[in-house]
Amino acid sequence: MLEVLLIDDERLAIENLKNLIETYCPCLHVIDSASSVDEGIIKINKLKPDAIFLDVNMPGKNGFELLAHLNSVPSVVFVTAHEKYALQAMKVCAVDFLLKPIDINELIQTQIKLMTLQTLKPEIKKNYGQVLRNLSILIDKPGSVRKITLYGNNGYEIFELDDIIYLAGEDNYTLFHFINHKNMMLSRTLKSYEEILVPFGFMRIHKTTLINLTHIKQILRNESPQVVMANNIHLQVSRRKSADLLEWGKNLTD
């Protein structure tokens, strides 16, 4: 059983989350709670919980500032009701997060991830620490970190965004294609990665395809528009998206 600490400035939010954890997460035990970042820092350093559920938006200091003041970093689950950009940043770094109001199924999946993280090898846990550092930098200086951390069969792996050629989606799964010919399947929709990656130079060209614009070699304006990527793969462009792609290409020569 993992010991967890809840940090939120809203007492009702703490009580609600505690009740949900006690009801649906038998592997998690809530040992205490804190209502501010400063109180959270003290309790984390004293109690050394296995994981914390950390609210993003709190008066005075936000949840991200807490991470820099810890003697040791537990597993972190961010909780937020808004702040869309902060939510996207969490997704970029693949840190567990919960959006208020909390969905029970997502909470159960979070429990599974927390339990899995406890069993990872030391070098993979070290990667998790890097994930959190990337997140802090990303929030402080948007766009300065061009990395994505993906949670796969071997735990957390960190990739350069520039190494991604394109993503292919099917139902609730997304397949990443990298320049080193490595592929990686993730159980998350293509739309969720579109929200993350578009600000970093990616474009949705088809309902099943999201591409890294830096890896386009050629745009083919046939009856059926296509792009040729750096790995010489030809990808279909939907007619609805072809105008956006051609406009992007035109802007490069302006």
Image (cartoon, helix red, strand yellow):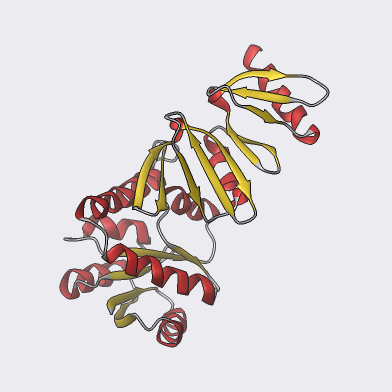
Q: Which quadrant of the structure image shows residue 219?
A: top right
Does residue 196 appear in the picture of this structure?
no
Q: Which quarter shows the C terminus?
A: top right
Residue 119 in percent (x, y) is at 26, 64
Q: Give the side of residue 182 with respect to residue 27, left or right.
A: right
Q: Which quarter shows the N terminus?
A: bottom left
Q: Give the side of residue 106 with respect to residue 6, left or right.
A: right
Q: 6 or 182, which lies in front? A: 182
Residue most toward the right? 223
What number of labels is visible?
0
The residue sitting at 72% across, 22% down in the picture is 246
Q: Which quadrant of the structure image shows residue 95?
A: bottom left
Q: Give the side of residue 235 with respect to residue 108, left or right.
A: right
Does residue 187 appear in the picture of this structure?
yes
Q: Which quadrant of the structure image shows residue 56?
A: bottom left
Residue 181 in percent (x, y) is at 45, 31
The residue sitting at 56% across, 48% down in the picture is 174
The residue sitting at 77% across, 19% down in the picture is 221
Residue 20 in percent (x, y) is at 46, 83
Q: 209 or 204, which lies in front? A: 209
Eyeballing the image, is 112 above or below 158? below
Q: 91 or 13, which lies in front? A: 91
